[in-house]
């Protein structure tokens, strides 16, 4: 009875605190277990990617024009896009990579070059996406997260390179590593499923197999890489570099 | 007012009659007759235990897959423990409906329960449900797979599995813990 009146409150608070502590202990093993499990899942053999790498390409526009068909066919085969000629609808069928011919009107010099997603460092498609589906990975690869893409096509409007396509029709025969579906936007992924496992994109590999080095792929951040040395040695251009989007694809001979 | 009371009284009487068994013949068709048949449990192709206990997988597989898909697409984390490729690896089965049973597909496994529970989500509008041909090899099993020895039931005896599950659910509800 001699205790101050607030001592009761203190005691009650202690009881409450004690109870809470017990609850934490009781719950903790389960939580700890789950946390460990989650960590084990995160520590897979591959990833996460970091910004230590910056994947890029160097495309030689002076290469013989025929090699680009090889690259485009390799892309179609790898990723499962492309419609047989009899069903083709060129105005709407997806194009992940396309041949573009240019000509200097003064000199008459011509070149043909492949244009695909330029994997910009400041991608406008990511800026405008209302759902966050259009995104850039830490290593510079720009992708569409089709899980949350709503197919609004704002990114297609924003892209200075018209690199993205909307899937208008039902898709079948998808590759296990490249899900595709009607109502989403898609574009060149730099063959992200290959790159993550240390392989080169399908177009580059196909060209290399045919003895051509017309497309070079590698880490622009690594000064020892072939591509970084080539970019440092030769004058290269990036399409619409005036826009400040910092594309990851460099061209020679344009 | 009076008619409402009458209706109420009649319905109470009806309930009493039904409870006592008098209404058995005139009541609506019994629950059993109208019940959707239990889904067939498709046995895993590889006959192994899953990456988590079966009850956890049944409850949480969507959350686990959703979590890993974000990690894979956005951070490039591959060979995740809870991957759709992992599901396909073990659970894709052959069915005469698909390519005359010449390829393994995971769709029947998923569709059985999704149809039963009226779940509309379908990964396979975009993802390929087919197992790559080389994946039937036991050597490609994930490291954390262990052969079936005890504990987790992977069985063709569907009723036993379901009864066991229902017993667990009843226990959880009885003991006052939140049923998940």
Image (tube, coloured by chain):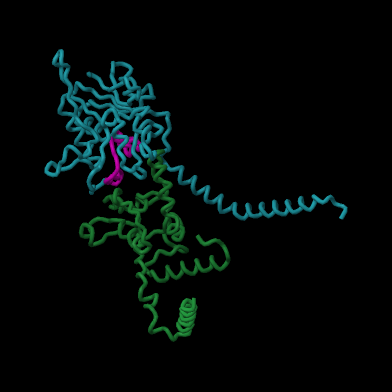
Chain colours: A cyan, B green
> Which residue is painted at 76% across and 50% down in the image?
A10
Q: Position of residue A113 (x, y in %)?
A: 20, 25
- Magenta segment's dominant SS is loop
Of A203 and B36, nearer the camera is B36
Q: Position of residue A89 (x, y in %)?
A: 16, 40
In reply to whether residue A192 is colored magenta, the answer given is yes
Horizontal placement of B47 versus A202: left or right? right
Residue pushed farthest top? A106
Residue pushed farthest left? A86
Of A149 and A246, nearer the camera is A149
Residue pushed farthest bottom? B22
> Which residue is painted at 45% across and 85% down in the image?
B21
Chain part drawn in magenta:
A175-200
Q: Where is residue A80 in the image (x, y as percent from the top left)?
A: 23, 42
Residue A140 makes an appearance in the image? yes
> Which residue is painted at 34% across and 28% down in the image?
A120
């Amino acid at each position: 009875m001699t205790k101050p009146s607030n001592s009761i409150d203190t005691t009650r608070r202690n009881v409450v605190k004690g109870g809470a502590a017990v609850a934490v202990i009781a719950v903790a093993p389960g939580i700890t277990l789950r946390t460990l499990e989650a960590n084990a899942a995160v520590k897979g053999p591959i990833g996460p990617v970091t910004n230590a790498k910056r994947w890029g390409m160097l495309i030689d526009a002076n290469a013989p024009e025929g090699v680009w068909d090889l690259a485009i066919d390799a892309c179609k085969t790898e990723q499962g896009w492309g419609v047989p000629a009899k069903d083709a609808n060129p105005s709407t069928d997806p194009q992940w990579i396309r041949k573009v011919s240019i000509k200097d009107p003064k000199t008459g010099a011509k070149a043909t070059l492949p244009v695909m997603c330029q994997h910009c460092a400041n991608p406008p498609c990511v800026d405008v996406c209302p759902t966050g589906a259009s995104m850039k990975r830490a290593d510079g690869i720009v992708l569409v997260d089709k899980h949350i893409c709503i197919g609004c096509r704002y990114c297609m409007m924003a892209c200075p390179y018209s690199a993205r396509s909307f899937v208008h029709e039902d898709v079948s025969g998808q590759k296990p590593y490249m899900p595709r579906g009607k109502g989403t936007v898609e574009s060149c992924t730099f063959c992200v499923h290959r790159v993550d496992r240390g392989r080169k994109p399908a177009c580059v590999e196909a060209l290399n197999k045919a003895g051509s080095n017309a497309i070079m792929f590698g880490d622009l951040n690594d000064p020892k890489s072939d591509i970084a040395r080539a970019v440092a040695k030769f004058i290269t251009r990036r399409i619409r570099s005036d826009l400040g989007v910092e594309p990851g694809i460099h061209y020679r001979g344009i | 007012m009076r008619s409402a009371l009458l209706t109420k009284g009649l319905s109470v009487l009806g309930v009493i009659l039904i409870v006592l068994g008098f209404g058995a013949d005139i009541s609506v068709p019994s629950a059993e007759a109208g019940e959707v048949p239990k889904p067939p449990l498709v046995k895993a192709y590889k006959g192994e235990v899953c990456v988590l206990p079966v009850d956890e997988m049944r409850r949480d597989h969507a959350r686990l897959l959703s979590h890993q898909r974000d990690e894979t697409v956005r951070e490039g984390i591959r060979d995740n423990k809870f991957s759709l490729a992992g599901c396909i690896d073990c659970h894709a089965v052959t069915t005469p409906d698909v390519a005359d049973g010449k390829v393994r597909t995971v769709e029947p496994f998923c569709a059985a329960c999704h149809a039963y529970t009226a779940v509309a989500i379908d990964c396979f509008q975009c993802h390929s449900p087919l197992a790559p041909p080389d994946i039937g090899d036991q050597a490609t099993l994930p490291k954390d797979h262990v052969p079936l020895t005890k504990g987790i039931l992977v069985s063709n005896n569907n009723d036993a599995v379901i009864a066991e599950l229902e017993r667990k659910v009843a226990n959880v509800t009885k003991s006052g813990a939140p049923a998940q």
